[in-house]
């Protein structure tokens, strides 16, 4: 007996919600930008490396600007209008990335720094005996 052929479903017209969250992770080596809805479902994302930057150039403010601009344009094309920005990490491109989101046509309602800060941190090494 033959198995029935797989039925292909219709492709959904992906529509982003009007409000979303932009997660910008700026490390010293790379910039990762993710746009999600308020529930946390990813709508668009990109990294500096995926736009042709290699090596130490991935951590520059210019790479962060290009990356944020491309991702924000994708979100605007899907119908997003307003975002809250969450910035994480000690990298150079933090402010530049937020400006690029605004230039792409998204209204920034809030900016929040979610970089983790140690409360007393790791145990220091033993005192050196000479």
Image (cartoon, rainbow, N blue to C red):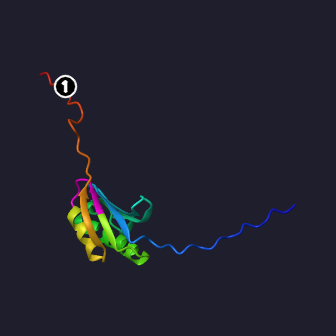
Up the image or down, 96 lies above or below 120; here it is below
Q: Which quadrant would the C terminus be assigned to in this image?
A: top left
Residue drawn at x 25%, y 64% as measured from the top left: 110
Tell whether 116 sits left or right of 5.
left
Tell whether 80 sits left or right of 123.
right
Task: Report x, y in % for residue 80.
Answer: 38, 73
Q: Nearer the viewer, residue 94 or 12?
A: 12
Residue drawn at x 15%, y 25% as measured from the top left: 128
Instruction: Kindly identify which residue carries mark 1.
Output: 126
Residue drawn at x 23%, y 44% as measured from the top left: 117
Q: Label 1 crowding class (10 Å Cα cut-off): few <14, some 14-19, many 20+?
A: few
- Residue 88 in the magenta stretch? The answer is yes
- Whether residue 101 is visible: no
- Whether residue 88 is visible: yes
Task: Report x, y in % for residue 65.
Answer: 27, 69
Q: Extreme top residue here?
A: 129
- Residue 56 in the magenta stretch? The answer is no
* Residue span colored magenta: 85-92
Quadrant of residue 96 within the rendered picture: bottom left
Q: Extreme right residue here?
A: 1
Quadrant of residue 7 within the rendered picture: bottom right
Task: Report x, y in % for residue 13.
Answer: 53, 75
Quadrant of residue 94 within the rendered picture: bottom left
**SS category of the residue bearing label 1:** loop
Q: Nearer the viewer, residue 116 or 92?
A: 116
Task: Report x, y in % for residue 50.
Answer: 39, 66
Q: Nearer the viewer, residue 97 or 86?
A: 86
Q: Which quadrant would the N terminus be assigned to in this image?
A: bottom right
Q: Extreme left residue here?
A: 130
Task: Count the marks.
Answer: 1
Residue drawn at x 32%, y 67% as measured from the top left: 83
Up the image or down, 114 lies above or below 105; here it is above
């Amino acid at each position: 007996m033959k198995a029935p052929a797989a039925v292909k479903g219709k492709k959904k017209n992906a529509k982003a919600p009007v409000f979303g969250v932009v997660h910008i992770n700026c490390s010293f080596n790379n910039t990762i930008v993710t746009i999600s809805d308020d529930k946390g479902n990813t709508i668009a994302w990109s990294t500096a490396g995926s736009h042709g930057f290699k090596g130490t150039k991935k951590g520059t403010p210019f790479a962060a600007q290009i990356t944020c601009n491309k991702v924000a344009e994708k979100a605007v094309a899907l119908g997003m209008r307003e975002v809250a920005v969450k910035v994480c990490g000690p990298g150079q491109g933090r402010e530049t990335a937020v400006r690029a989101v605004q230039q792409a046509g998204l209204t920034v309602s809030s900016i929040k720094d979610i970089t983790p800060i140690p409360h007393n941190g790791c145990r220091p090494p033993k005192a050196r005996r000479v």
